Amino acid sequence: MKRDIDNLMERRGIDVAIVEGVIKGNATMFYMVNGAQISHATVIKKRGEEPVLICGTMEREEAAASGLKTVDSSKYDYMKLLKEADGDRLKAQVAYYTKIFEEFGVKGKVAFYGEVNMSAWWVFLNALQKAMPDIEITGEFAENLFVRARATKEPYEIDRIREMGRRTCEVVQHVVDFIKSHRVEGETFMKADGTPLLLADCKAEIRMALSARNIIEEVGTIFALGRDAGIPHSRGKESDVMMTGKTLVFDIFPQEAGGGYFFDMTRTFVFGEASPEILEAYAQLSEIHDKVTASLKMGEKAGVYQTMVCDAMEANGHETPRTNPQVTDGYVHSLGHGIGLNVHESPRLWDGPGNTDVLEPGHVFTVEPGIYYPSKGWGMRIEDVYYVHEDGTIENLTNFPRDLVVEL
Amino acid sequence: MKRDIDNLMERRGIDVAIVEGVIKGNATMFYMVNGAQISHATVIKKRGEEPVLICGTMEREEAAASGLKTVDSSKYDYMKLLKEADGDRLKAQVAYYTKIFEEFGVKGKVAFYGEVNMSAWWVFLNALQKAMPDIEITGEFAENLFVRARATKEPYEIDRIREMGRRTCEVVQHVVDFIKSHRVEGETFMKADGTPLLLADCKAEIRMALSARNIIEEVGTIFALGRDAGIPHSRGKESDVMMTGKTLVFDIFPQEAGGGYFFDMTRTFVFGEASPEILEAYAQLSEIHDKVTASLKMGEKAGVYQTMVCDAMEANGHETPRTNPQVTDGYVHSLGHGIGLNVHESPRLWDGPGNTDVLEPGHVFTVEPGIYYPSKGWGMRIEDVYYVHEDGTIENLTNFPRDLVVEL
């Protein structure tokens, strides 16, 4: 939570945190400016002080919407500095930051954050370090302090994720109904014009259903049929014909329009009849999902649940990343991840070395076991989002049935 | 163009270029993997050799769609390295890259590119440099070689931008028709339910019209009325009531779904009657736009056109960034920018120090003069996209009329 930032800075020995970059696709910036729709900015957060937002004149109104103290960047007159540097942009940028750092008394260990162009920033931070030998430019490699703060959500964030969940479930139902509304010839769904219903048509329907609810596909939805359903990250082939009897993995992770909170859920459907092999595997998967989610407990290590799922999968005869690091048939990934302003964030439900994540109040994360047999032409996954309340209650934020078979 | 990359590497003394990060919002990665829908990857481009894509097992099919030589990252067994490093992710990542660099014979001056998390990469590149003292880790500050290569478009890119232009113009017309379809009471557009038409309703219509054409708002469209039209980056207030007689700045810059090419155009509309003051300013603006675009010439310095517009604006009594660096009333920004996989790229139509950009064959850029008087409650901008053909012909890719007044 935001109120943890000062403590985290202190524990990590950071005197000043600087957040840089555009707002879009830059969760740290979005978080710090409270989602204000500026295009790019600098946020300076000194330990124990309120953050300050430095932003261009043209975006003064958007900047004000952040609720932060704002400073108009024209004050530092980059253009004048660029002229003085004879058009040398690196020199001018070093001069610009030197001015800002002097004004704000930036000293000590100064950590930079944000999604930026690495090539330019590697050169720039090296030049800045050289120009300001009294400060120590630093960063954080693994879970940085903002990622850590963001992992535990405040009530206003839960409200937004919950609302995203509601809209996302509506979209899933809408698309199921859309497919069902088509008549079937043999094993193929047919459009009114007599041509087969394509996966591309379903994807277009997903986009329209999302847009109608003012939520966006930040990256393409996973909507994969048959063999492709067996490859967890396959987005599905647009030219595929929608057919009965095949597993459809529908993994949808939309974001608030304007770049805000995500939701993330997966359902697997078979329209019409499912084969005994698929039915049996789905029964195993449901049971494993139920078992692991029933055992979620505040204070428990997040990695424990991956171990639990690997145990159960192996007991059912499926390979896992534990038995084969390059596994492609069986259970092939980790169990889940936090969601928020990124679709993947802390905690990690994964038993790999060094993962010390523990389920904490405020955590919002997915649980998404799956069974994949691309060689047999199918795959399946069930994914819900869970929230750890202050009192340890675990709430499923995904209000959607789990039925595999959609009767026609 | 892509074929320039080896030459650019040579001229800039770069032996190996490494492109990192996710694909979404990372134009360099998108460019190098030909838009393949992988989530994240590493591309290694040695000077004089074909690029190689390193990507996870789960995304092997998407990776193959890039057409590049691909290597499955599981080969380097990060998990084993993480175990050996006792869960220290930084140490494991250094070991992982060391392995890759050894296999590919990465030597000499190694430049990193891509949009990444700065905090982690600053720490990582410093650690990697320490671990591999024989290579020189570097970057490029200003226009890096990929930005430079991307600035001149190949025919397949022009086809995609042209098609984006066609769809974008359709959306603009659709939204104008949508507004016109409402009845007017006094100066207010009214919905069928008897409540006023809000700017939010128009924005929803924009989103749906974009979705229907499989293009996306990468960041929010500028749709700003009256006073807000006078603030170039104002996105418009959702609660504003749509009214006649006010300037509406409609600046739309959608992207291909999945993260590809952009278009970018602006029209200013007044529904019903425009005041003499607004009509006069718009006549000036149209004349300036015509004059500057008629003079576009291959081989000319791009900054010349900003100078030309400033001259004309000042002759009409408007302040410019030249007369006042903090100008908010008058002509307040630069004239244009390249578009492609980013909405702002090279060339820059701007007369600032150090801008040596020259109009070249393959360049695709906007020309977008505007006049802004937020204090008087109005603003206006006209923006079209131009393409410099191989033979120097300048083509306007924006097929949309410029009429200010929309008759009701």
Image (tube, coloured by chain):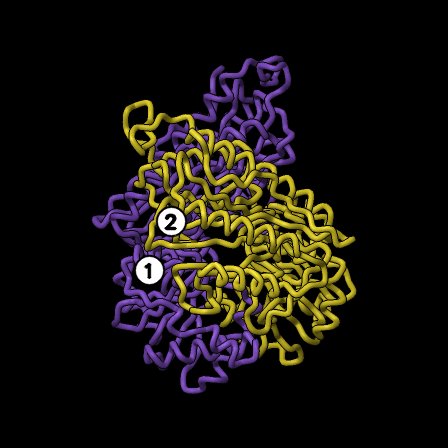
Chain colours: A yellow, B purple
Residue type marked 1: Ala
- Say which of B157 and A75 sits in front: B157
Residue A293 position within the rendered picture, expressed as x and y whole percent measured from the top left: 62, 53
| Residue annotated with mark 2 | A378
- Which structural element holds mark 2? strand
Rendering quarter of residue A110:
bottom right
- Say which of B361 and A6 sits in front: A6
| Residue annotated with mark 1 | B149
In the rendered structure, the answer to whether residue A100 lies left or right of residue A330 reads right
Quadrant for the N terminus of chain B, please: bottom left
Residue farthest to the bottom, as pictured: B134
In the rendered structure, the answer to whether residue B69 lies left or right of residue B56 reads left
**In this rendering, is residue B63 above or below B406?**
below
Residue B168 can be seen in this image: no
Q: Residue at x 38, y 28 (%)?
A: B401
Q: Are marks 1 and 2 in contact (CB under 8 Å)?
A: no
- Say which of B234 and A327 sits in front: A327
Q: Residues within 10 Å of mark 2 (few under 14, many from 20)?
A: many
Q: Residue at x 33, y 42 (%)?
A: A238
Q: Chain of mark 1?
A: B
Q: Residues within 10 Å of mark 1 (few under 14, many from 20)?
A: many
Q: On the same chain: label 1 and label 2?
A: no
Residue B256 position within the rendered picture, expressed as x and y whole percent measured from the top left: 39, 43
- Which structural element holds mark 1? helix
* Mark nearer the viewer, 1 or 2: 2
Q: Residue at x 30, y 52 (%)?
A: B153
Q: Chain of mark 2?
A: A
**In this rendering, is residue B102 above or below A288?**
below
Residue type marked 2: Trp
In the rendered structure, the answer to whether residue A338 lies left or right of residue B399 reads right
Residue A163 position within the rendered picture, expressed as x and y whole percent measured from the top left: 64, 39
Residue B259 position within the rendered picture, expressed as x and y whole percent measured from the top left: 42, 48
